[in-house]
Image (cartoon, rainbow, N blue to C red):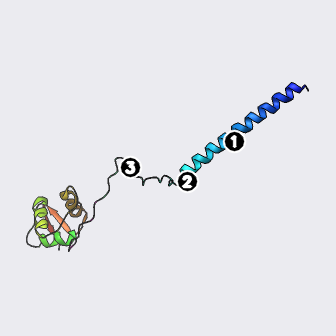
Amino acid sequence: MKLTDVNKYVALREALANEKTALEARLAAINAALEGKAPAVAAKPGPKPGVRRRGKRAKNEMSMKEAVVKALAAKPLSRTELLQAVLKLGYKFTAKNPLNSLSTLLYSDKSIKNTDGKFAVGK
């Protein structure tokens, strides 16, 4: 090995050592700057697009079935008449279309009979 090759190697190694020292100093400065900063906290994920959250349930003194039975006690009523009667009794609906909720009860409850579009409590 020639002396010039050794000199080149020593010079290159010294240059790399100097560059390493400079980079370490720069990295130490960056770390010091970042130390005082809190890590970024991911925000809570919101609802998925197109997903609606349900509203709170209304606080009613009686169930919908109780209100319907009370409204039908006097005489048979149509769906829309029954809806008005249930609302007059103070029952609160939270649905966008309360008639749909009422209809679900009317057609699924075996104790409520439908005769020509008029609903009555069966005996």
Mark 2 or mark 3, which is nearer to you? 2
The residue shown at (21%, 55%) is 96
Q: Which residues are magenta?
A: 55-62
The foreground one among 13 and 80 is: 13
Q: Secondary structure at mark 2?
A: helix
From the image, which quarter does the C terminus lie in?
bottom left
Q: Is residue 116 visible?
A: no
60 falls in the magenta region? yes
Task: Indicate which label's residue lies in the foreground, 3 or 1.
Answer: 1
- Gap in Å between the C-alphas at discs 3 and 1? 50 Å
Amino acid type, residue under disc 2 in the picture: Glu
Q: Amino acid at mark 1?
A: Thr
Give the structural element (helix, strand or loop) at label 3.
Answer: loop
State how far apart marks 2 and 3 are (Cα).
Answer: 35 Å
As measured in the structure, the alpha-carbon distance from the residue carrying label 1 to the one carrying label 2 is 21 Å
What amino acid is labelled 3 in the image? Lys
Q: Which mark is residue 38?
A: none
Whether 116 is among the magenta residues is no
Label located before the other in sequence (2 or 3) = 2
Which residue corresponds to mark 2? 35
Which mark lies nearer to you, 1 or 2?
Answer: 1
**First of labels 3, 1 by sequence position:** 1
Counting from the top left corner in percent of width and height, residue 3 is at 89, 26
Label 1: how many Cα within 10 Å (few below 14, some 14–19, many 20+): few
Residue 118 at what x, y percent from top left?
11, 62
Q: Find residue 1 and report its horizontal and vertical position in percent.
A: 91, 27
The quarter of the displayed image where residue 26 is located: top right
Residue corresponding to mark 1 = 21
Q: Position of residue 111 (x, y in %)?
A: 21, 70
